[in-house]
Amino acid sequence: MLRKIRKAPAKQEPETILHDVMAIFKSALIAVILTLICFTLFAVIIKIADLQEDVIPPVVQVVRILSAAIGGILASRASKKMGWIKGGITGILYILCALLISYVFGGSAFMGSLILSDILLGFVAGSIGGIIGVILRN
């Protein structure tokens, strides 16, 4: 007289625009925090290892690409569809936040063509991360 116990389906959050926007903002914020942590660690490594300054630009680009991709992964895992678009938007938002932080603390002037290439880089890296996030989710 054992009855089969039916499992209740897992509670799923509704796919709303607000949910997507919050996931994108949260993922971009996490990507910015990850970048700041990586840059801090890299500064310590440069100081301890007495590295030359010519290693800084490639490391900065790699950290930015990986952070945008990780942000894209996080954004796409929070939703069920269009992961590449949500990842790309996250990448763009991440780059814009990073540029704003760079401007506020570095005081450097914005250069038009470099901003566009950075935004494109953020979109591509975030989109790839979004695709990876959808694949990992399944």
Image (spheres, grey):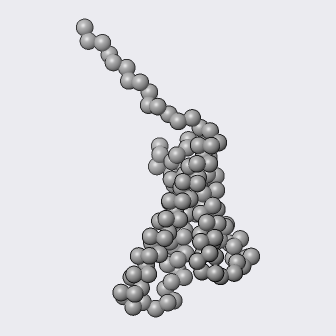
Where is residue 88 drawn, in percent x and y? 62, 57
**Residue positioned most to the left:** 1
**Is 73 rendered above or below residue 39?**
above
**Is 116 rendered above or below residue 47?**
above
The residue located at (45%, 72%) in the rendering is: 38
**Residue positioned most to the right:** 112
Q: Quadrant of the N terminus?
A: top left
Q: Is residue 95 visible?
A: no
Q: Quadrant of residue 2?
A: top left
The residue located at (51%, 83%) in the rendering is: 56
Q: Is residue 21 visible?
A: yes
User: In the image, 46: left or right of 70?
Assistant: left
**Is 34 rendered above or below residue 6?**
below
The residue located at (60%, 45%) in the rendering is: 20
Q: Quadrant of residue 121?
A: bottom right
Where is residue 11 drawn, in percent x and y? 46, 31
**Residue positioned most to the top:** 1
User: In the image, 77: left or right of 94?
Assistant: left
Where is residue 82 drawn, in percent x and y? 62, 46
Where is residue 53 drawn, in percent x and y? 49, 90
